[in-house]
Image: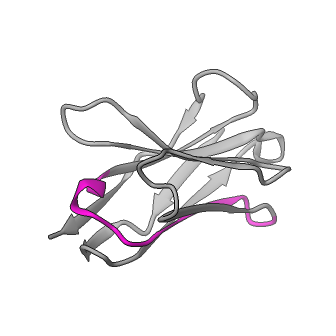
Amino acid sequence: QVQLVESGGGLVQAGGSLSLSCAASGRTGSWYRMAWFRQAPGKEREFVAQITWWSGITAYADSVKGRFTVSRDSAKSTLHLQMSSLKPEDTDVYYCAADQRSYGEYTYWGQGTQVTVAS
């Protein structure tokens, strides 16, 4: 059974930094890609960053490019998101996602972790 568990959320001042982690279990050897999304109440889920598991190729939303860095630890089956220069508009619930395919909607999702950036 696949499980994705996020951690590292919290409250930070604007301009500060925060690091999120996502521990994956089950079928981890077959991941093609993993990603971070975020969602505020009443809004659609928004793509943040993605990494292709074996190649390490990354992609970012324009809104976070240059401020956020996505990485993975293959040995520990863990996905990371290093966030810096945080802004109040980065306040959201952040979700980890994983899939064995290279395209389409992500199949597996974590439960989310709250990030709050105070102005």
Rendering quarter of residue 117: bottom left
Question: With 79 as the anchor, is 82 left or right in this view?
Answer: left
Rendering quarter of residue 73: bottom right
Q: Residue at x 47, y 65 (%)?
A: 67
Q: Residue at x 49, y 44 (%)?
A: 61
Q: Residue at x 72, y 45 (%)?
A: 26
Q: Residue at x 33, y 68 (%)?
A: 86
Q: Residue extending furthest top?
A: 104
Query: Looking at the image, is 75 positioned above or below residue 108?
Result: below
Residue 35 horizontal/vertical position (percent): 58, 45
Q: Quadrant of the N terminus?
A: top right
Query: Looking at the image, is 54 positioned above or below residue 109?
Result: below
Name the image colouring. Answer: one colour
Residue 7 horizontal/vertical position (percent): 45, 64
Whether residue 73 is in magenta: the answer is no
Q: Quadrant of the C terminus?
A: bottom left
Query: Looking at the image, is 70 positioned above or below residue 53?
Result: below
Q: Residue extending furthest left?
A: 119
Depth check, front residue: 25 or 44: 44
Query: Looking at the image, is 38 positioned above or below residue 11?
Result: above
Question: With 42 as the anchor, is 4 left or right in this view?
Answer: right
Residue 116 horizontal/vertical position (percent): 24, 63
Residue 71 horizontal/vertical position (percent): 66, 62
Whether residue 77 is in magenta: the answer is yes
Question: With 94 as the anchor, is 31 left or right in this view?
Answer: right
Please provide the residue range marked out in magenta: 75-92
Question: With 29 as the anchor, is 86 left or right in this view?
Answer: left
